[in-house]
Image (cartoon, grey):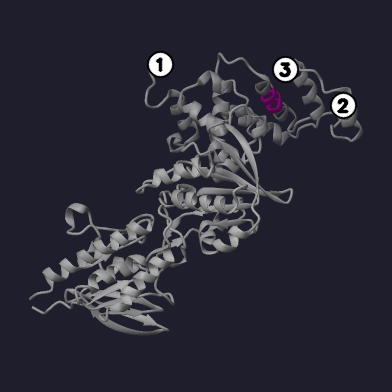
Amino acid sequence: MTMGQTAISSMQTEVERKANVNLDTCMQCGCCTGGCSGIEAMDFSPRQIIQLIKMDEWAVLLNSRTIWMCVSCHICEDRCPARIKISSVMDALRAIAYSQPTAEPNKQIHFHNLFLGQVKTFGRTHEGLLMMSYSLKAKTPLPPMRLIIDYLRRLRVDMKPPHMLGKAYRFTIKKAQEGGKDHGA
Amino acid sequence: MEMLNQEVLIIGGGIAGMQAAIDIGASGRKVVIAEKEKTLGGHVKDYTCLFPDLSNGTALVAQKVAKVEAFPNITVQLETEVSDLERVNGGFKASLTKNSASETQNFGAVVIAGGYGNFDGTKYGEYGYGRYPGVITGIEFEQNMGEILKRPVKTAVFIKCVGARDRSKGMPYCSKVCCMYTAKQAKELKNAHPDASVYVTYMDIRANFKNGEEFVRGVMEEERVRYIRGRVGKIFPANGCLTVRMEDTLKGVPQEIEADLIVLATAMVPVNSTNNLVMKVGGKVDDNGFITSLPLAESTNPMEVAKGVYYAGACGFPCDVRESLNQGSAAAAGVLSYLQVNGRP
């Protein structure tokens, strides 16, 4: 397939601006993957993600699991011989994926929305509520009964009603929402 | 006008400094070699085997030392450091310090052959050098080759670019010789343990030496050393041996190799001991700490650092033994023509 590839892809320009990095310093050495703590859950390694950005593969990138599975542990960033801020690149990609109007909201985006929504409402997450609302929203089944019983018996999930917010916190959240920009970038 | 002193000071008695001394000494001029170690020969005297022709470095040094000692006009000052160097009347005044007693001497020209240092492997915490006895550096492999080849080795991994091509460690340059010496060491290990699996992890193979490409291909094709493209992420102990975790970037999947010997191909780093001397006589040092020659269009000799000052060997940039010898000879030619032209009233 031939395509009119410009020297710098539009994806690259956008990610570089958002994350304040220069992706052309990447030598494709794979040191990031070697240390990555979430690599088992990823479909593309961080090294491949950088190459995909350079090759302007929007569809592949925005549907990849990798950008959501990155736990931002910064090990890759610490070891990268080219000093690329890979965690910031992942953040930028998540922000782009989130703000894509055409992008089908996937499970990860649902989870992020629910999680942040709970933090905004209750000041913290409530595991029981989060689990249930996520199951409804993302149309995934609840965890198996045996796990639910285990959660309850070992108090892994808080069964108390959600925490109620103080006045100061509500005020902070309100202010943050008024002046808040799109999260992530 | 005063006659320029015809004596030449050579800082460093490694292979490059000795070659320069031999070539200058043959003209009958007096030469002083200031060497800070107890013996001549620098790093090369520890190398029993040089790439790509597998000749013996120790024997090469012995031959050069014999030649140096055969010249009555070459003085070797061991355990001596040049503590100060300044320009005086067109020549140079140097303070040679030995056992904290220093004496000054005048010279007409100076050759700087300060050599190089080895990258400190402990700067890569994730490779565990210094913590795990199975992790050694390439230089240690070279120095204790007999003992290491006797170890029972089932799987060995050579890791290239340790301290090279790494901006986050402040080492952006390619150390140039590591690809070749790693291939050579892998070949030696494979010869000692034909049943062992030997892996080399690389980012790019840079074998830009005469017969270098053929040598590396031979190591892959005949010795069956497995080259894996990728930079190692971490090394951790598991099941009684060391596990190397990396991405095979050609397969695109993370990979773990269990090894009992890991050799870090550490880079050549500049020694900063001669840098202040270079700057004092008007020479320049680049961002990495290596001595820089004058721009080619402005100099009369490629090894010229400043008027009457020349460099040779790895104090300018990482280079192999043959190139060090070439540079030593080139610096000697520069010194001789400089003294010939400027030494007369």
- Say what amino acid the circle numbered 3 marks: Ala
Distance of label 3 from label 1 (alpha carbons): 38 Å
Q: For mark 1, give the secondary structure.
A: loop
Q: Which residue is mark 3?
A: A138
Marked residue chain, label 2: A
Marked residue chain, label 3: A
Mark 3 surroundings: few (<14), some (14-19) or many (≥20) residues within 10 A = some
Q: Are marks 3 and 1 on the same chain?
A: yes
Write the start and end of the magenta stretch as one range.
Answer: A111-117
Mark 2 or mark 3: name the one nearer the start of the chain: 3
**Compared to B327, does B234 lie above or below?**
above
Quadrant in which residue B67 is drawn = bottom left
Q: Which residue is mark 1?
A: A2
Mark 1 surroundings: few (<14), some (14-19) or many (≥20) residues within 10 A = few
Residue name at image x 48 percent, y 52 percent: B184
Marked residue chain, label 1: A
Quadrant in which residue A134 is drawn = top right
